[in-house]
Amino acid sequence: MSANKCEHGQKVKVEKTVALTLKLRPIRQPWHTVCYMDKHRRESCLRMLSVSNRRLLVL
C-alpha cells in the first residue's frame, strides 16, 4: 500500500469527522479552527469557513 493512499484516506476521514462535528454543533461564528493529531503525532490545525452550514472551505 502506498503512503499517498494512506494519507489521502486519513485526510478524508478527518474531513468527514470535522463535517459531522460542525453539523451537530450550532454554529455561532463563521470561522472554525479544528485541531487533530497527524501521523507524526504533532497537532495539526485546519481553519475552516462554514458555508451555509453544509459546505466547508478549508483554508
Image (tube, grey):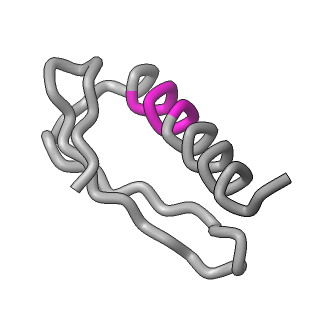
Residue 4 vertical position relative to residue 52 in the rendered view, above or below: below
Instruction: Give the residue at the far right of this rendering.
Output: 1
Q: Bounds of the magenta span? A: 16-22
Location of residue 53 by image quarter: top left
Left or right side of 31 for 20: right
- The image shows residue 32 at horizontal and vertical percentages of 27, 50
Q: Residue at x 15, y 18 (%)?
A: 52
- The image shows residue 14 at horizontal and vertical percentages of 57, 44
Number of numbered discs: 0
Left or right side of 48 for 44: right
Left or right side of 7 for 1: right
User: In front here: 25 or 56?
Assistant: 56
Name the quadrant of the C terminus: bottom left
- The image shows residue 33 at horizontal and vertical percentages of 33, 57
User: In front here: 40 or 3?
Assistant: 3
Q: Residue at x 57, y 35 (%)?
A: 17
- The image shows residue 55 at horizontal and vertical percentages of 26, 24
- Let me know if residue 12 is in the magenta part: no
Majority secondary structure of magenta residues: helix
